[in-house]
Image: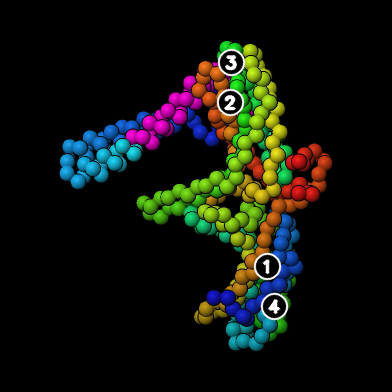
């Protein structure tokens, strides 16, 4: 089962992790063979690369394993978007593959600003989270059959509305976090539109 | 460099997204460039910049053919085009301004910019809109 419309594809995350491990290993191998000062530098670079790549691979793997607990997970968020100071409406549909215990469910609203600089072969990405708030979801503790969990999340007025340009982006996403007993936690995020409107009285 | 040959007066310096922008451009003082000028143009520019590559949304509003006399006025009115709201982030900044250019052949073109803020459009609560508590 693959969750549709998420910001991150776990298969690609695992592939990137695998490629990173191969490259990190190669840097280590070549550096150690060269010996001398180059070996110390390649050891540092190779180990850092390996560490980050293993983390990436495990992140993708955890999500893949967690997805096995469900035969279907769908997050439906209002396609029209939400105004500033409004309430994001949506539904989280969960169908377990077999009975599963959910110890906690949460929905994290996260606004990100991202800028890309490209000139010739120079390419840099700058990104920061400018707003993050975690809201607990009312999820059934024991899930034996399909369940639909309503989502009603207040959106603050001080975040920027969604905008995507060629190099600059202001985006808001909702991340579902489900803590499952006997399974890795299931985390996935989906972007939603924050409209350039504010509810009067805010 | 901004020129003192041109003055820009906006009806409001805080505007709602996709809202109405209106103002007047004045050429207040005598200068030889006014007689030689071929064209006076007004446009609204949204400049998205910061740490990334710069992006611009340009919307021509009004223009007039020269020459011009001192005291000449050009009124303009339009609706803001689609673009991000004013924003000053760490990596992304969004600035809106009106830019007026005086096209003078064989001379540096005098120009002037007048910044303004774009804020979210106000919605009335109700009519299917839930308000955050």
Quadrant of res A12: top left
Task: For mark 4, name the chain.
Answer: B
Q: Secondary structure at mark 2?
A: strand
Q: What chain does badge 3 belong to?
A: A
Whole-number angstrom distance, CA of label 3 to CA of label 2: 11 Å
Q: CA distance from mark 1 to mark 3?
A: 64 Å
Residue at numbered disc 2: A178
The percent coordinates of residue A196 (x first, y second) are 68, 49
Majority SS type along the magenta span: helix
Q: Is residue A29 left or right of residue A180?
A: left
The residue to which callout 1 is attached is: B62
* Eye-nearest disc, 4 or 2: 2
Q: Which of the chains bears the disc numbered 2?
A: A
Q: Residue A103, located in which quarter of the rendered image?
A: top right
Residue at image mark 3: A100
Q: Indicate left or right for A144 with B127 as reference.
A: left
Q: State the separation of the CA atoms marked 4 and 2.
A: 62 Å
- Mark 3 vs 2, N-terminal side: 3
Between the C-alphas of marks 4 and 3, the distance is 72 Å
The residues bearing labels 2 and 1 have C-alpha atoms spaced at a distance of 55 Å
Q: For marks 2 and 1, give the one nearer the viewer.
A: 2
Where residue B26 is drawn, which disc sits there?
A: 4
Query: Which residues are the magenta region?
Result: A50-75
Colour convention: rainbow
Give the vertical position of B58 relative to B106 (above or below).
Answer: above
At mark 3, the secondary structure is strand
What secondary structure is found at the residue carrying circle 4?
strand
């Amino acid at each position: 089962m693959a969750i549709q419309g998420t910001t991150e594809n776990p298969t690609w995350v695992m592939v990137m992790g695998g490629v990173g491990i191969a490259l990190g290993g190669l840097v280590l191998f070549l550096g150690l063979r060269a010996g001398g000062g180059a070996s110390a530098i390649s050891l540092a670079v190779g180990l850092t690369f390996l560490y980050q790549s293993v983390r990436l691979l495990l992140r993708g793997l955890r999500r893949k394993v967690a997805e096995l607990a469900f035969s279907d997970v769908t997050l439906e968020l209002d396609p029209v978007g939400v105004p500033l100071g409004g309430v994001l409406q949506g539904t989280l549909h969960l169908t377990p593959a077999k009975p599963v215990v959910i110890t906690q469910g949460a929905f994290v609203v996260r606004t990100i600003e991202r800028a890309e600089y490209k000139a010739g072969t120079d390419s840099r990405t700058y990104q920061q989270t400018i707003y993050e708030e975690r809201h607990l979801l009312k999820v059934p503790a024991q899930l034996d059959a399909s369940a639909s969990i309503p989502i009603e999340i207040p959106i603050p007025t001080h975040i920027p509305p969604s905008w995507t340009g060629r190099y600059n982006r202001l985006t808001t996403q909702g991340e579902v976090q489900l803590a499952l007993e006997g399974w890795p936690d299931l985390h996935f995020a989906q972007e939603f539109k924050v409209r350039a409107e504010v509810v009067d009285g805010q | 460099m901004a020129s003192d040959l041109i003055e820009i007066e906006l009806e409001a310096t805080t505007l709602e997204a996709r809202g109405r922008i209106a103002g007047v451009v004045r050429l207040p003082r005598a200068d030889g460039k006014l007689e030689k000028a071929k064209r006076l143009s007004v446009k609204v520019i949204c400049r998205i910049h910061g740490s990334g590559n710069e992006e611009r949304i340009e919307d021509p509003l009004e223009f007039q053919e020269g020459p011009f006399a001192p005291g000449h006025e050009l009124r303009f009115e339009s609706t803001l085009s689609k673009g991000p709201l004013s924003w000053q982030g760490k990596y992304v900044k969004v600035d809106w301004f009106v830019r007026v250019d005086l096209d003078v052949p064989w001379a540096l073109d005098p120009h002037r910019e007048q910044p303004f803020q774009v804020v979210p459009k106000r919605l009335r609560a109700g009519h299917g809109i839930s308000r955050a508590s």
